[in-house]
Image (cartoon, rainbow, N blue to C red):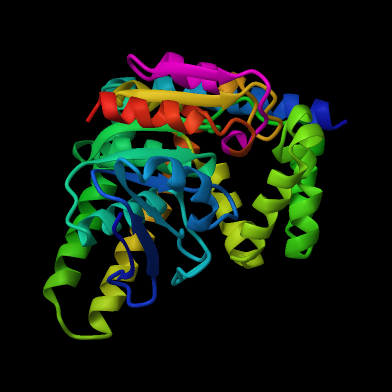
Amino acid sequence: MSSGSGIVNRLDGRTRLYWESSGSGDPVLLIHGLGLSGGAWWRTVDALAGTMRVITFDHRGIGRSESLTYAYTTEAMADDAVSILDELAIDRVHLYGFSLGGMVAQQIALRHPTRVQSLVLGATHSGGRHAAYPEPDVVAFFRRRATMSSREAAWASVPYNYGPRSRAEQADQIAEDIERRLANPFNERAYRAQLLAASLHNCYRRLDRIRAPTLVVHGARDRIIPVANAHMTAERVPGARLEILEDAGHLYPTEEPAVDRGIGEFFAAHG
Amino acid sequence: MMAFMEDVLRRAVDAAGTVGRAALIPWGGAEACVDAYEMAIRALTDAQLTVARAVEVEPVRAVLASCAEMTRDIGATHLSSVRWILDV
């Protein structure tokens, strides 16, 4: 298995994007969610890197990446991801976006359709007025979270991130997730910028323009992005397949690790 | 009170969307107009980036690239809001 890492410098002279690559085979780009870094994909990287070249990166302003300003959009984040593909001389890629990363993946599929071999949209929504938004207590928590320390926020978010079964039976895995997350802290301004980007995201009416084979994956117990969004997305994207994980919450890759194998098979079927 | 305000806001956005969609019919409809605006934003962004790549003098290149990013992001913000209001 080969691995590497590097930095892409954007033309503005200040935006720098850190990426990592593991394994060999068809390339897959993993796009992480709100407030996380590329390192948050460690479980999925391990699952896919045996048969694929797995590329992760830190969004602008997060982890080892930097940004010129803290005002950006999912469009900007999509163009960042494509600049990493350009740097690595990759023409087409399988895309797997999770949560905010799923919104960025939708933008890539719409803005750069020739670059997308297949698409997995995990625990995400398409924005706009048709999206199903979380309960008010969840929204209030995420506003409050920006004022907490990283460790406090990571533990306080457990009831929102994980389903009841996982909280009862997977305490070790949750603790492991949090320790990994705390190893790559993010600053408050970047977090707020990502929240704004997610709030402005709006692809709902254009999902029917996506041509890449698409798999939509969602936990039925997701409190952050309600599962109704997965049904809406799968209905809008032509030919999309929907997989609902009945017992899982938002962070289903931890709760249902077997899903990564199914996602690998989906990529292989569309290689 | 919050629910009442949200309802008023939703009705106002719906009314604005109805008026906006009707007003854009002579120009091919709301969706065509928003798509054309999006294409214009992308063309302008790409043109600025092309010039930035060609100019090898700093800080001129960085300024041009930053302008391109602002054009894209401000345009994206407009588009998101307009798509929300017009529901296209």
How many numbered marks have been drawn onto this rendered protein structure?
Answer: 0
Can you tell which quarter of the image residue B33 is in? Answer: top left
Q: Residue at x 28, y 29 (%)?
A: A268
Residue sitting farthest toward the right: B1
Asked whether residue A16 is drawn in magenta, I would say: no
Q: Tell me: A84 left or right of A143.
A: left
Residue sitting farthest toward the left: B54
Residue B27 appears anywhere in the view: no
Q: Tell me: A89 left or right of A8.
A: left
Spot occupied by residue A85 in the image (x, y as percentages of width and height) = 25, 54
Q: Tell me: A223 left or right of A117.
A: right
As displayed, is residue A244 above or below residue A47? above
Image quadrant occupied by the N terminus of chain A: bottom left
Residue range (magenta)? A230-253
Spot occupied by residue A264 in the image (x, y as percentages of width and height) = 37, 32
Image quadrant occupied by the C terminus of chain A: top left
Q: Residue at x 73, y 51 (%)?
A: A175
As displayed, is residue A245 above or below residue A72? above
